[in-house]
């Protein structure tokens, strides 16, 4: 078994490449037709085939909104796929959970969140990062703080899991650091074309390098808008050694390509990935002797 480069989130060793779940769950960022194609194509077995490739390469960390209130057929399919892949590979998947939480004030909301965190702990989540759809509405740009998140972090710690922030807002990372919020990692959208990013790429680059804790970058290939070599070359060359890159795939061969491209970039060598061939490329192919 190969060992993909690793980093640490507190005392937990995680692979620097993180397995993303959008392509497994049917979130293409392209069209409803593409979403439908994904959901119809992928099953627990085919996703387990993909996960098995990652695990064999030492990429054992997966990010997903696997728990309430996001549960549905695709989420159960992914949970089943994880169990199957773990059985095949004889290796556990480290789960970074990005659940929804109740963002309201009061005891009722806290009781609901306590139940959600109990479910995640029972299902083996190691890191819990409340989903961006819940985290970002709590970002108070006037007070420069993230409201109610301190209590969520306490409840996550009480269940022996590591708290983090799933966010699309760069402000969330800055305010978490300024307020010494008890989180150990954060998510940041980061890609060469600024896809879905709130501010310019160079600003996010600076923000990542200033962050107090490791950053899990997402959307490196801008949901298919960048070639893997282009997107991954930018990400791996501009983040810190402690930071991570999250990738999405639909087939085992795609997983193999992303692993090989990433290792070639990190090791500064040529990739062994077979390029696609078309008639227009014939003029640049080496002649056979």
Image (cartoon, rainbow, N blue to C red):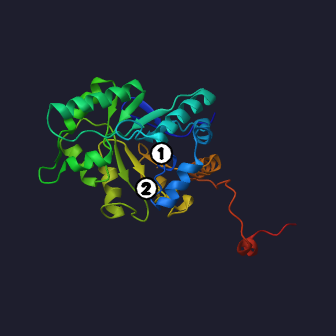
Report, in whole angstroms, how far the alpha carbon at label 1 lies from the one at label 2: 23 Å
Work out which quarter of the rendered image holds the C terminus and state it. Answer: bottom right
The correct choice, above or below, for 77 with respect to 143 in the image is: above
User: Which residue is depicted at the point 26% across and 28% down?
Assistant: 114
Residue at the image point whose x is 42% and y is 65% from the top: 193
Q: Nearer the viewer, residue 126 or 115?
A: 115
Q: Would residue 171 be seen by someone viewing this image from the given angle? A: yes
Q: Which residue was labeled with disc 2?
A: 238
Q: Where is residue 66 shown, x and y percent of the image?
A: 42, 37
Tag 1 residue: 21
Residue 177, given in percent of the width and then of the height, sits at: 23, 44
Query: Measured from the top left, where is residue 228 in percent x and y?
Result: 55, 58
Q: Earlier in the sequence, mark 1 or mark 2?
A: 1
Question: Which numbered marker is on residue 2?
Answer: none
In the rendered view, tell whether residue 100 sits above or below residue 272. Answer: above
Residue extending furthest toward the right: 289
**In front here: 272 or 134?**
134
Residue 183: image location, x then y, percent: 28, 37
Is 139 placed left or right of 186 in the picture?
A: left
Crowdedness of circle 1 by 10 Å Cα count: few (<14), some, many (20+)?
many
């Amino acid at each position: 078994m190969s060992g993909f480069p690793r980093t640490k989130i507190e005392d937990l060793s995680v692979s620097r490449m993180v397995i993303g779940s959008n392509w497994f769950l049917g979130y293409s960022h392209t069209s409803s037709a593409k979403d439908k194609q994904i959901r119809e194509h992928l099953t627990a077995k085919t996703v387990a085939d993909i996960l098995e490739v990652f695990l064999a390469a030492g990429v054992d960390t997966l990010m997903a909104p696997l728990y309430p209130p996001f549960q549905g057929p695709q989420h159960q399919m992914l949970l089943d796929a994880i169990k199957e892949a773990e059985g095949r590979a004889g290796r556990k998947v480290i789960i970074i959970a990005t659940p929804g939480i109740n963002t309201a004030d009061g005891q009722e909301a806290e009781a609901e969140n306590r139940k959600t965190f109990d479910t995640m702990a029972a299902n083996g989540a190691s890191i819990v990062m409340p989903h961006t759809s819940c985290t970002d509405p709590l970002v108070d740009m006037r007070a420069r703080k993230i409201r109610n998140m301190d209590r969520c972090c306490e409840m996550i710690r009480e269940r022996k899991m590591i708290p983090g922030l799933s966010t699309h807002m760069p402000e969330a990372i800055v305010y978490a650091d300024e307020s010494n919020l008890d989180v150990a990692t954060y998510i940041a959208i980061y890609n060469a074309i600024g896809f879905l990013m709130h501010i310019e790429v160079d600003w996010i680059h600076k923000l990542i390098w200033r962050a107090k804790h490791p950053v899990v970058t997402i959307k490196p290939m801008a949901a298919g808008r960048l070639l893997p070599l282009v997107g991954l070359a930018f990400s791996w060359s501009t983040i810190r050694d402690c930071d991570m890159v999250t990738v999405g795939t639909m087939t085992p061969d795609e997983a193999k390509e992303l692993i090989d491209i990433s290792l070639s970039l990190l090791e500064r060598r040529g990739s062994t990935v077979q390029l696609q061939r078309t008639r227009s490329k014939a003029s640049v192919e080496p002649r056979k002797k």
